[in-house]
Every structure is written in C-alpha cells, then in structure tokens.
C-alpha cells in the first residue's frame, strides 16, 4: 500500500484565512519530504522541502512541520489567496531504498473562496 | 532558464498504436525521472535515467513500456501497443547533476488518451 497518505481529500477556506494540509507517512526511514502544488492541467510545482534533521522550515507564506514521532507532515499556508487553489501533494524519499524515487500521496484539493 | 519541457502536451492514440513522449530536462540537469498520474491520484514513479543509462526502471510495466535518455536529445518514454488503461498524464522531472537527491522539477506533462 501507499506509504504516504493524506488525512483530508478536500479543504475549503476563506480568502485570507490560514490553511493547514496534513500528510502521514509510514516509512520511518524516510528522511526527505517535499510539498508540491499542482494546478489543473499543469505539472507539480515545488513548494518547500524538509529533511528529517529538522522539524520546521519556513518559506514565503508557507511553513512545513515534521513530526517524526508520529510520522506526520503538514503544510501551513498563511493568508490563503485564490491563487493557492490547487491540489497539494506530499512526497517522501527514503535513504533505505532507492534514494531518488519520490513516493507521492493522493493529494488534497484546496479551494479558496473569495 | 527554461523549465522542463514535454511534448506533446496532449496525445490521442487508438488501441494498438504506439505512443512516444518526449522530455527535455532543465538546462544543466542530467537526471531524468518519469512518473504516471491517473485521474485523482498521486504520481507513481516509473523510471529514473541518466544520460545513456537506465538507473532504475522498477516502476515500469514489464511489457510494452521502454525509456531512453540518449547522449544527445530528449528523453523518450515509449509505449507500444497502447491499451485504454494506459490513458493517464505522464510527467517528466529532472534534477541537477549534483545528485539524484536534489529537488526534482516537473514538466507540464503529456496527457495520453487511448481510444
């Protein structure tokens, strides 16, 4: 089965609110995690990544949190905008196996209401 | 700096025909990955190539699918005798020559429809 999965398939928020997208992984050997954004008809776009030696990383309006104890990953988007509407995927990479192969979750559809 | 290029963007084939999907990595990138995405699902790894070498094809179906990344020119994903189940979006990604654990950047994809 999938080693990476998402708790919520859809998320609807109001413009200006903060969004939190969650992801669970089952492989404790995973040491690199990435969030991608995919707009309709386009390829995945890199948002932010984090390595297992960190528990938090911030970018522009986005923050990724990693909790290795419960094998949970989250993406926080501050002041969500209509342009943030997309499907968000978490992906993992584990050094115990093929260290170049990304394993993707099924995705969460984020809808931002004006 | 142009991103990952894929063509065609849309491809329609009848059952039994061949499909050829092309991918040009970002400038300076020598690692190419192919993924397949079924509707409303995440991407599934298919194959990882470096110039003239297939490094890992563990995600490729055993039959009808092949990939190459020649010394010159784009990477090609070839599907022979396509069936309806091959209908999907196929994405190519590339990463810098610095190593396969570098960030993978994706192209816009080729959407294959098999009639």
Image (tube, coloured by chain):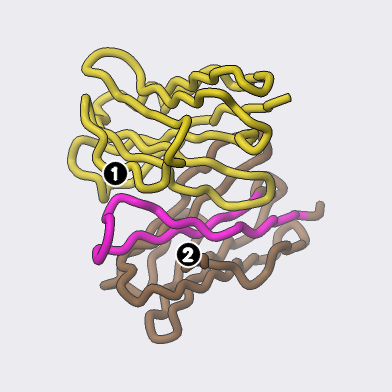
Chain colours: A brown, B yellow
B60 or B107: which is nearer to us?
A: B60
Quadrant of residue B75 within the rendered picture: top left
Which one is in front in this view, the residue at disc 1 or the one at disc 2? 1
Q: Does the rendering let one see residue B1? A: no
Badge 2 is on which residue? Answer: A63
Residue A60 placement (x, y as % from top left) = 47, 54
**Chain of the residue on which disc 1 is drawn:** B
Q: Which mark is residue B56?
A: 1
For this view, does A76 lie left or right of residue A46? right
Residue at 39% across / 57% down in the picture?
A49
Residue B36 versus residue B15 in the image, above or below: below
For this view, does B113 lie left or right of residue A48? right
Quadrant containing the C terminus of chain B is top right
Label 2 sits on a secondary structure element that is strand
Q: Does the rendering let one see residue A61? A: yes
What stretch of residues is rendered in magenta? A87-112
B20 or A47: which is nearer to us?
A: B20
Direction right: furthest residue: A114
Residue A26 versus residue A50 in the image, above or below: below
Residue A9 placement (x, y as % from top left) = 69, 64
Q: CA distance from mark 1 to mark 2?
A: 32 Å
Residue at 68% across / 33% down in the picture?
B84
């Amino acid at each position: 089965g999938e080693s990476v999965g998402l708790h919520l398939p859809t998320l609807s928020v109001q413009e200006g609110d903060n969004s939190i997208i969650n992801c669970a992984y089952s492989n404790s050997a995973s040491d690199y995690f990435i969030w991608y954004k995919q707009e309709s008809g386009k390829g995945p776009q890199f948002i932010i990544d984090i390595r297992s030696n960190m528990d938090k990383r911030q970018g522009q309006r986005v923050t990724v949190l990693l909790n290795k104890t419960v094998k949970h990953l989250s993406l926080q988007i501050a002041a969500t905008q209509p342009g943030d509407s997309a499907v968000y995927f978490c992906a993992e990479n584990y050094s115990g196996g093929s260290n170049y192969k990304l394993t993707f979750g099924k995705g969460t559809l984020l809808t931002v209401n004006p | 700096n142009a991103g990952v290029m894929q063509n065609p963007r849309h491809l329609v084939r009848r059952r039994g025909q061949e499909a050829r999907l092309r991918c040009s990595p970002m400038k300076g990138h020598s690692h190419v990955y192919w993924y397949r995405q079924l509707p409303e699902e995440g991407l599934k790894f298919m194959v990882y190539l470096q110039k003239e070498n297939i490094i890992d094809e563990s995600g490729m179906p055993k039959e009808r699918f092949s990939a190459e990344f020649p010394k010159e020119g784009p990477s090609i994903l070839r599907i022979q005798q396509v069936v309806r189940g091959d209908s999907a979006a196929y994405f190519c990604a590339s990463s810098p020559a610095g190593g396969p654990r570098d960030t993978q950047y994706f192209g816009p994809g080729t959407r294959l429809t098999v009639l």
